Image (spheres, helix red, strand yellow):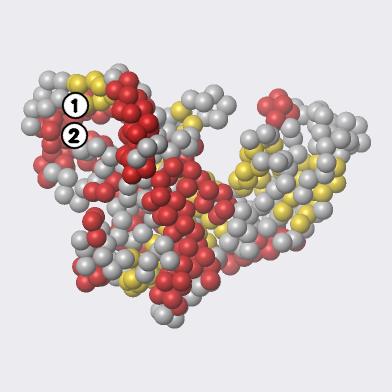
């Protein structure tokens, strides 16, 4: 990995090392999580942003051979950094770096990658039979890509779908049967197709959210798909993650974050797009039929604890497909929601009653009840390990009942609806209307159901 030569300014801080590889790894602090904007177009005005648990600075790369200037947080916020005469010192400390040809080579590689047409691009999709995965397969096939869909021989909810049914469901794609939890199985299945892979899209997700399942799928199986894809020639990886990893209190969130970090720092010419969607439509449709039948709309607390910008499976699949070609989505973490304003559970319920022409009737469940149940399960799990997952399920339920699925402002600790991007045309109201008429066919929660 080529490294840029770093020269410390007038400060007592140790000179850090900056990598100009695609992963843009850094040694700016003991704990440093790196995120970078893609190098785009002509080699001018690039920006790299580094975020860390201990510091947040900004680099500006003005051109080949120019310097990278590190601005401490105070200087960045002020907008008018202090410059010492004859030097590049901002506040108490600064660094400068000399750009190398690595950045130019990365830019050229991406431009070459962009020139490939959909017909020339082989895309491997893992988690292809999942709720979102099957829509991604459909979207990529529609756009003309050569899709290799990886699936289990017994797939779907409860493993009820046979290999023959899967081939029919994923029409237009080359279906490749393999076990994503076994990297050798993946490599062998992909290799048997005799194709190189250009892009990997991972839609893998734990079905239960249990501790072991989370690490087995959200981390290990997803990592296997990365290794198998790269071994077959992949140079870009699109990851379907979740917006809730911003505040990781649950096991599946920690597993996803660990893989996100490894992906962002993988290097070796691999670019990435990490997609973090808000709530899915199906997670909000479970009460439609009961309310239609005269039941109350159930919510926790005052009905305003958690808000979201729900996105449809089709719109999310389209956004994921965009990540294969859109330069502004490369080497980025991409939170994304559906169209319209953020909706609280109270607002969702009011919308449903309005559609049904019914007088609103709500049942508000105190959060304390969930805390009590979780406490009991946690205590019992210390004696009976088989209760560990039920305790985790309770925590998952509480998380989704109390935390908003919106962008989290790290400085204020508050969720920001305005900062949460919107995409697509499908609305929750139209989804509710369809469920009222047709039921939840095709939207079953299956193994992912918590209650």
Which residue: 57% across, 26% down? Answer: 411
Near-viewer residue (188 or 193):
188
Q: In the displayed structure, would residue 395 be above or below residue 315? A: above
Quarter where residue 100 is shown = bottom right
Q: Where is residue 21 in the image (x, y as percent from the top left)?
A: 68, 58
Counting other residues with Cα less than 10 Å from the Cα at mark 2, is it few (<14), some (14-19), or many (20 or more)?
some
**Quarter occupied by the C terminus:** top left
Label 1 crowd (10 A; few <14 / some 14-19 / many >=20): many
- Whether residue 107 is visible here, answered yes or no, is no
Q: Which residue is drawn at 38% across and 33% down?
A: 378
Decide which of 59, 45 is in the foreground and name it. Answer: 59
Q: Position of residue 376 (x, y in %)?
A: 33, 29
- State left or right for residue 413 relative to residue 53: left
Distance CA(mark 2)–CA(mark 1): 7 Å
Residue marked by disc 2: 287
Quick check: 441 left or right of 16? left
* Residue at point 54%, 24% (across, down): 412
Instruction: Look at the numbered discs 2 and 1 and tell me whether their residues touch, using CB distance below 8 Å.
Output: yes
Q: How many labels does the image show?
A: 2
Q: In this view, does 222 lie to the left or right of 135?
A: right
Q: Is mark 1 on a helix, strand or loop?
A: strand
> Which residue is disc 1 drawn over?
297
Q: Is mark 2 on a helix, strand or loop?
A: loop
- Residue furthest left as drawn: 293
Residue 20 appears in which quarter of the rendering? bottom right
Q: Name the residue at 74% across, 32% down.
A: 72
- Where residue 173 sits, quadrant-wise, is bottom left
43 to the left or right of 332: right
Quadrant including the N terminus: bottom right
Where is residue 88? Give x, y as percent.
Answer: 85, 37
């Amino acid at each position: 990995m080529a490294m840029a030569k770093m020269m410390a300014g007038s400060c007592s801080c140790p000179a850090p090392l900056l990598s100009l590889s695609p992963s843009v790894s850094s040694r700016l602090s003991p704990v440093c999580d790196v995120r970078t904007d893609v190098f785009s177009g002509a080699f001018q005005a690039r920006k790299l942003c580094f975020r860390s648990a201990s510091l947040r600075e900004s680099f500006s790369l003005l051109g080949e051979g120019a310097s990278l200037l590190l601005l401490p947080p105070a200087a960045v916020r002020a907008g008018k950094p202090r410059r010492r005469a004859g030097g590049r010192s901002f506040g108490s400390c600064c660094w400068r770096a000399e750009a190398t040809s690595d950045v130019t080579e990365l830019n050229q590689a991406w431009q070459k990658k962009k020139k490939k047409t959909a017909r020339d691009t082989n895309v491997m999709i893992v988690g292809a039979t999942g709720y979102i995965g099957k829509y991604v397969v459909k979207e990529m096939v529609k756009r003309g890509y050569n899709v290799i869909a990886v699936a289990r021989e017994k797939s779907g909810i409860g493993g009820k779908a046979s290999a023959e049914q899967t081939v029919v469901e994923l029409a237009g794609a080359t279906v490749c049967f393999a076990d994503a939890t076994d990297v050798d199985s993946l490599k062998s299945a992909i290799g048997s197709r005799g194709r190189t892979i250009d892009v990997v899209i991972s839609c893998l997700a734990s079905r239960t959210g249990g501790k072991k399942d989370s690490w087995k799928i959200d981390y290990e199986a997803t990592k296997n798909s990365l290794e198998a894809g790269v071994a077959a020639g992949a140079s870009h990886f699109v990851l379907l993650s979740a917006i809730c990893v911003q505040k990781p209190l649950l096991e599946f969130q920690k597993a996803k974050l660990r893989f996100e970090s490894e992906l962002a720092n993988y290097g070796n010419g691999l670019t990435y797009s990490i997609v973090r969607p808000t709530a899915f439509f199906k997670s909000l449709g479970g009460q439609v039929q009961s309310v239609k039948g005269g039941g109350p709309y159930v919510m926790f607390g005052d009905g305003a604890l958690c808000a979201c910008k729900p996105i449809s499976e089709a719109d999310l699949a389209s956004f994921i497909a965009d990540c294969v070609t859109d330069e502004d989505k490369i080497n980025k973490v991409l939170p994304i929601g559906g169209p319209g304003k953020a909706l609280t559970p109270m607002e969702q319920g009011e919308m449903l009653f309005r559609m049904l022409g019914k007088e609103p009737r709500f049942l508000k469940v105190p959060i304390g009840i969930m805390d009590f149940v979780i406490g009991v399960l946690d205590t019992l799990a210390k004696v009976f390990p088989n209760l560990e997952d039920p305790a985790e399920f309770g925590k998952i339920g509480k998380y989704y009942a109390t935390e908003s699925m919106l962008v989290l402002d790290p400085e204020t600790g508050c969720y920001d609806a305005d900062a949460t991007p919107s995409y697509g045309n499908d609305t929750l109201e139209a989804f509710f209307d369809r469920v009222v008429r047709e039921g939840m066919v095709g939207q079953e929660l299956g193994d992912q159901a918590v209650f």
